């Protein structure tokens, strides 16, 4: 690693930012259902609108980071997050419990949380190609750790102190991330590259259809981007419905505190894999086969959740799911990053992350819709899509000369 200090700052920034996001995960479905009295379909939209805005704005932040640098884009987006938490606090504290304001605050949060492409670009700037997957794994570990502590913290605080306090704490964490980015992070993109990119800059659009088409049809990275999209969609099926499933009296009768601990356990497993085992699997079986292994584990993890006869079995299934998700995501990020040039890192990673955000919008909306027909369907449909993705991956792997 060329700059361990920059890597540490990005890790802490993303971790703190995702900690705030993770706090909201067990709160939003529970608050929406019990306080705002809305059905599962609308809950899916409220969960997903955050990611819809990320879909629109992530490539914009990625492209702007190629022109103006990584640091100012990260600072601006993290500052916007603070404002979004203020709006959410008005809703969750009961000052203004409006479905519309909740939707607006979630959309606003999505716009300014579309900063992952800039963070990934920092990793690309400071890591050589042979260490790129490891760097992406460390970034993924920051995500995983955010989900380790966030849901548990949100569940505990909301169960004992009400919905408002966890949101206020999320805003404080996001403000801390802003201060870290301002005071410690140094610019990682050389000035000559920024000037060249600015000279060639032709503007941005809210939805860069041409850019998406160029990335998806790219012979080097297109297939990886497609696989990433459907993996993300499959996993996102349960974002808005897992808590509703776990709280049912005919399943486990859990509260948001218990669900927070379960989601934190999922995050622990993913974080361990992404931080400690990526290099091992890359060395032993390679990146492409590691993606396949992760896909197989996610298939069984998703599909078996609603059939768990006990909490112990559910924990084992979620461990399998977390292991698979922790393995395939950083491997795909590493494969994408190592197959694009340095001056395109922000744009390509931004579009990939944008498509991932679109999947995280469609997934909860789909999950909320099919949940009304039976609580098993978000999990079953996610597992089925993962099966199709894995079959597609197997076919591509056979055609990939690098695996022969």
Image: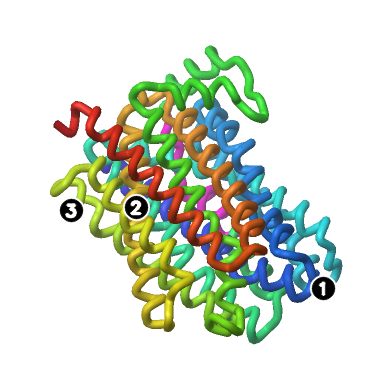
Report the residue at 45% width, 69% height from top: 305
Say which element carries label 1: loop
State left or right for residue 129 relative to residue 162. left
Element marked by disc 2: helix
Looking at the picture, does residue 146 appear above or below residue 391?
below
What's the image's color scheme?
rainbow
Dot 1 crowding, Cα within 10 Å, few <14, some 14–19, many 20+? few
- Residue positioned 38% across, 31% down in the render: 223
Query: What secondary structure is the magenta-colored segment mainly?
Result: helix
The residue that appears at 82% across and 73% down in the rendered structure is 94
Real-space CA distance between mark 2 and mark 1, rounded to the nearest whole angstrom: 38 Å
Residue at the extreme front:
373
**365 with respect to 93 (left or right):** left
Residue bearing mark 1? 94
The earlier-in-sequence mark between 2 and 1 is 1
**Mark 3 vs mark 2: which is more N-terminal?**
2
Alpha carbons under labels 3 and 2: distance apart? 14 Å
**Dot 2 and dot 1 residues touching (CB under 8 Å):** no
Q: Earlier in the sequence, mark 1 or mark 3?
A: 1
Magenta span: 175-189
Q: Is residue 52 magenta?
A: no
How far across and down, in percent of the image, does residue 67 sit?
53, 25
Is the C terminus in the top left, top right, bottom left or bottom right quadrant? Answer: top left
Looking at the rendered image, the disc whose residue lies closer to the viewer, 3 or 2, is: 3
Badge 2 density bin: few <14, some 14–19, many ≥20, Cα 10 Å:
many
Q: Are the residues tagged 1 and 3 within 8 Å (C-beta)?
A: no
Q: Which mark is residue 138?
A: 2
* Mark-to-mark CA distance, 1 and 3: 49 Å
Residue 225, image x, y percentages: 42, 35
Q: Give the residue at mark 3.
A: 280
């Amino acid at each position: 690693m060329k700059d361990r200090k920059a890597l540490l700052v990005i890790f802490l920034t993303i971790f703190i930012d995702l900690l705030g996001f993770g706090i909201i995960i067990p709160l939003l479905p529970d608050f929406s259902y019990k306080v705002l009295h809305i059905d599962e379909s609308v809950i899916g939209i409220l969960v997903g609108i955050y990611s819809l805005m990320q879909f629109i704005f992530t490539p914009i932040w990625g492209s702007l980071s190629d022109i103006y640098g990584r640091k100012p884009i990260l600072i601006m987006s993290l500052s916007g997050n603070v404002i979004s938490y203020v709006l959410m606090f008005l809703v969750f504290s009961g000052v203004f419990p409006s479905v519309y304001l909740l939707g607006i605050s979630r959309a606003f949060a999505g716009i300014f949380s579309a900063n992952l492409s800039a963070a990934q670009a920092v990793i690309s700037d400071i890591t050589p190609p042979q260490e790129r997957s490891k760097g992406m794994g460390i970034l993924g570990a920051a995500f995983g750790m955010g989900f380790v502590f966030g849901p548990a913290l949100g569940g505990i605080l909301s169960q004992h102190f009400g919905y408002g306090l966890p949101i206020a704490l999320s805003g404080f964490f996001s403000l801390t991330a802003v201060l870290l980015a301002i005071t410690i992070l140094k610019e990682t993109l050389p000035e000559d590259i920024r000037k060249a990119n600015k000279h060639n800059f032709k503007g941005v659009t809210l939805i860069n259809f041409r850019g998406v088409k160029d990335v998806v049809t790219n012979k080097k990275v297109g297939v990886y981007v497609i696989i990433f999209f459907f993996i993300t969609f499959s996993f996102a099926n349960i974002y808005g419905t897992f808590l509703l499933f776990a709280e049912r009296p005919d399943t486990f009768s859990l509260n948001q505190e218990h669900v927070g601990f379960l989601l934190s356990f999922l995050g622990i497993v993913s974080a361990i894999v992404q931080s400690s085992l990526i290099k091992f699997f890359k060395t032993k079986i390679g990146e492409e086969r590691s993606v396949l292994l992760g896909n197989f584990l996610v298939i069984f993890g998703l599909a078996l959740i609603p059939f768990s006869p006990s909490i112990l079995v559910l924990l084992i299934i979620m461990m399998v799911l977390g292991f698979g998700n922790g393995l395939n995501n950083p491997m795909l990020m590493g494969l994408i990053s190592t197959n694009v040039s340095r001056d395109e890192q922000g744009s390509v990673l931004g579009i990939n992350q944008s498509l991932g955000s679109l999947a995280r919008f469609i997934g909860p909306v789909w999950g909320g819709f099919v949940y009304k027909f039976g609580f098993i369907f978000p999990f079953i449909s996610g597992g089925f899509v993962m099966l199709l993705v894995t079959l597609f991956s197997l076919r591509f792997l056979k055609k990939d000369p690098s695996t022969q």
